[in-house]
Amino acid sequence: MLVLAVETSCDETSVSIVRDGKEVLSNIVLSQIDIHQVFGGVVPEVASRNHVLNITRVFDKAIKEANIKTEEIDLVAVTKGPGLIGALLVGINAATAFAFAHNKPLVGVNHLAGHIYAANIENDLKFPLIALVVSGGHTSLVYMKDHMDFITLGETLDDAVGEAYDKVSRMMNLGYPGGPILDKLAKSGKDTYNLPRPYLDKDDYKFSFSGLKSAVNNIIYHKTRKGEEINVNDMAYSFQEAVIDVLIHKLKTAANEFSVKQIVIAGGVAANSRLRQRVFAEIKEKEILIPKMEYCTDNAAMIGAAAYYTYKKEGSLENYQLAGYSTLNLDD
Ligand code: KG4
Ligand code: ZN
């Protein structure tokens, strides 16, 4: 089954051609990072407008690079949520128009399912599994008994992990997106700032990162008032260790409680080098899958991978009726 997949939930305009949910024939990702950098974060209206400007070109390029004919496509898939509503609607309208014009079935895909299925592109998901989805918009711990069977065990109550990275980076005027910047600086830092490990001692799978972010903010504020400098490497390291301590603790606890065969870590923050290093060092008893870098941050190949299984489970949409959802649970 040849799938054309579209992803526009945030600031990446992406179209991919994927065969049988596994073989990526093309994966074009047009990032708007340069455009949003000056604002220190993604501006929704600016993201939507740039999707509109670029989407047709990205479609053309994905089809051309995959070296396929339009007639060969069996299914059109698009992210239906969660995400920025205006941004989602650009992809949904483009995908719907394409499917309708070429008389192809259409399926809507959950973005978080996409992040998890990125791990199924080069490896095979083995059930039951626990997936940790960590991105700019989400922090979710998910239990899967089988394909497309999701139970969300816990989510963040406030900021997502990636969002916390981005905000801490902005507090220190280091740039956007903060994740890769802090990841790099932390390599030459030490854990000197003694930051809190939020929700580490709570007996559940909920996360919270806004208190940690405020703790960083307070330190910066008080040091600046006293005319003292912040050591950015040490702050990056201290912040990152606090985040990773919590993530690994909850992941380990869930993996043991549910006796899973596999642990999947997905989403933009799964690109973090220290998280990757620590998770393999500290969780020896389970198989760990982390998608390769290009499939961690937002891309349409992961939507194509999830679309194959979404279609198997749900079939295609009737009458090309597809709405966008700014919030959407995996369990819905
Ligand atoms: O999955 P993604 O591309 O978009 C969303 O669905 O949100 O994730 C983007 C997020 C950003 O917050 C970015 O700072 C973070 O992923 N990120 C990282 C790293 N690379 C990207 N966070 C920590 N370490 C990284 N190396
Ligand atoms: Zn994402």
Image (cartoon, rainbow, N blue to C red):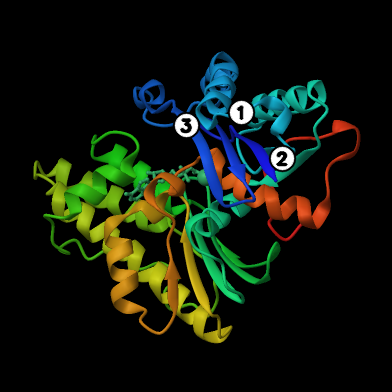
Disc 3 to disc 2, C-alpha distance: 22 Å
Query: Which disc, if any, is residue 87?
Result: 1
Q: Name the residue that disc number 3 marks.
A: 29
Disc 3 to disc 1, C-alpha distance: 15 Å
Q: Is residue 191 left or right of residue 321?
A: left
Disc 1 to disc 2, C-alpha distance: 11 Å
Residue type at mark 3: give it. Val
The residue at the point 13 percent across, 62 percent down is 190
The residue at the point 68 percent across, 48 percent down is 307
Foreground residue among 308 and 189: 308
Q: Name the residue that disc number 2 marks.
A: 325
Q: Position of residue 67 (x, y in %)?
A: 55, 29
Foreground residue among 225 and 282: 282
| 1 and 2 marks in contact (CB < 8 Å) | no
Residue type at mark 1: give it. Ala
Q: Position of residue 155 (x, y in %)?
A: 57, 61
Q: Position of residue 97 (x, y in %)?
A: 76, 22
Asked if residue 258 shows in the view, the reply is: yes
Q: Please, which residue is most extreme toward the left here?
A: 228
Mark 1, secondary structure of its residue: helix
Mark 3, secondary structure of its residue: strand
